[in-house]
């Protein structure tokens, strides 16, 4: 809820600053006449002060948001054991997946995305293969290797391992040079 409110406030703030900037540019460039607002009107003066105070308060709010530390900056998977709590970061899970998948021959350029759900964790692996082995066999090997390694290493249930073969790596071709 706070994020939605902050986004709405940021929209209003950006729109207000944009309108004020355009008015200032038009005023300074001479497009607007110098007396387009009557300076003696007390209501205009009060309205201007109120708008400027609101914009100042919004500026303070956005400044605070920009410098505060996010409490959820490091997402983790929490487990409870008989001895206490264990927290394993999602980055650790990703690195363990990369380690397990890189053990499969014929796989290159691995990228991993981990999602946490009620049934356990879902892992999406993007890989480039060398084309020398069967892609269904390689995919099944990656799935089994990552699933077994993660459950054995972390104890976290793995609900799904998806493999996306993005491309086949081109082997470098060497041309013989004749001199």
Image: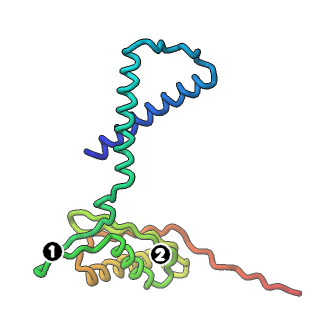
Residue 170 position (above or below residue 153): above
**At x 34% / y 75%, what residue is drawn?**
92
Quadrant location of residue 137?
Answer: bottom left
Q: Secondary structure at mark 2?
A: helix
* Near-viewer residue (60 or 149): 60
Q: Count the marks.
A: 2
Q: Secondary structure at mark 1?
A: strand
Quadrant location of residue 157?
Answer: bottom left
Quadrant location of residue 123?
Answer: bottom left
Q: How is the image coloured?
A: rainbow
Query: Which residue is outermost to the left?
Result: 82
Query: Which residue is outermost to the bottom?
Result: 179
Residue 68 x/y as whole percent: 34, 55
**At x 15% / y 74%, what residue is drawn?**
80
* Near-viewer residue (126 or 138): 126
Quarter of the image where the N terminus is located: top left
Front label number (1 vs 2): 1
**At x 40% / y 35%, what residue is drawn?**
13
Residue 56 x/y as whole percent: 38, 37
Residue 66 position (above or below residue 123): above
**Disc 2 designates what residue?**
135
In the image, which disc is placed on residue 80?
1
Residue 140 visible in the shown view: no
Residue 121 visible in the shown view: yes
């Amino acid at each position: 809820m706070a994020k939605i409110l902050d986004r709405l406030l940021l929209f209003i703030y950006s729109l207000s600053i944009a309108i004020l900037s355009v008015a200032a540019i038009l005023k300074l460039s001479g497009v607007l006449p110098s007396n387009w607002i009557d300076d003696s009107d007390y209501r205009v003066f009060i309205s201007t002060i109120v708008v400027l105070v609101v914009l100042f308060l919004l500026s303070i709010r956005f400044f605070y948001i920009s410098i505060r530390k996010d409490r959820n900056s490091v997402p983790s998977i929490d487990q409870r054991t008989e001895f206490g709590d264990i927290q394993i970061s999602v980055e650790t899970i990703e690195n363990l997946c990369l380690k397990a998948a890189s053990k499969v021959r014929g796989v290159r350029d691995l990228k991993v995305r981990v999602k946490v759900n009620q049934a356990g964790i879902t892992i999406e692996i993007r890989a480039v293969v060398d084309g020398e082995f069967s892609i269904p066999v390689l995919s099944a090997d990656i799935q089994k290797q990552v699933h077994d390694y993660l459950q054995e290493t972390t104890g976290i249930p793995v609900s799904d391992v998806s493999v996306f073969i993005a491309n086949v790596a081109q082997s470098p071709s060497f041309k013989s040079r004749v001199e």
